[in-house]
Amino acid sequence: GQQVMQIPQYQHVQEGEDFTTYCNSSTTLSNIQWYKQRPGGHPVFLIQLVKSGEVKKQKRLTFQFGEAKKNSSLHITATQTTDVGTYFCAGSNYQLIWGAGTKLIIKP
Amino acid sequence: DVKVTQSSRYLVKRTGEKVFLECVQDMDHENMFWYRQDPGLGLRLIYFSYDVKMKEKGDIPEGYSVSREKKERFSLILESASTNQTSMYLCASSHRSYNEQFFGPGTRLTVL
């Protein structure tokens, strides 16, 4: 069946370093959404990408949707402690198919 | 603000018990969803509903059923709870398919 693979599962960074998570779908997607889940919290919608090759920015976060609409990435520049959490992609055709998430951990 | 509420944050049940998890949204959303979340597995869709009295199976419906008698309320039922149903259960709603989903705070269910 349709799958969305997300890597890495964890990423440990020093505060101030960059962070990137990648999602790859086995099929072409109509759109992709990104969510953030803080520790102990629930997923919160960040953004939706619809167009092939689309790039969107939210402050230090940059979201990309691949030309073939099968892959996407989220890049955070200069991480801060408030960025800690798990980032999920969710690709959509008929239903949302969720990636397993990437947990961002800031090293003490 | 969209609000999705779930009946309990924590629940402990015994094997074989019938368990009801309730979800209510106040934004007149057509779509409602039930997920379970387990470490390393992300969110897995159990059931969803696009309208009152309508339901569709998600990826892992076995051992679960749902009820949507009113637009704002979507219930998840574990007919006979088992230990492998110990998990975090998340309810979500959205205005239309493919639009952003709004999540409730989750219910952490432990089945002993």
Image: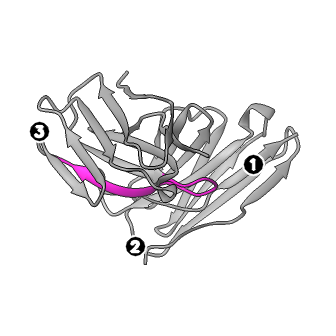
Q: Is residue A26 magenta?
A: no
Instruction: Tell me the mark number nearer the camera, choosing from 2 and 1.
Output: 1
Label 1 amino acid? Leu
Residue where numbered disc 2 is placed: B28
Disc 3 to disc 1, C-alpha distance: 41 Å
Q: Are marks 3 and 2 in contact (CB under 8 Å)?
A: no
Disc 3 to disc 2, C-alpha distance: 34 Å
Label 2 amino acid? Asp
Q: Is residue A46 magenta?
A: yes
Element at badge 3? loop
Give residue A60's position: percent from left, percent from top: 30, 55
Q: Are marks 3 and 2 on the same chain?
A: no
Q: Are marks 2 and 1 in contact (CB under 8 Å)?
A: no
Residue where numbered disc 3 is placed: A53
* Left or right position of A76 against A68: right
Front residue of A107/A82: it is A107
Residue where numbered disc 1 is placed: B109
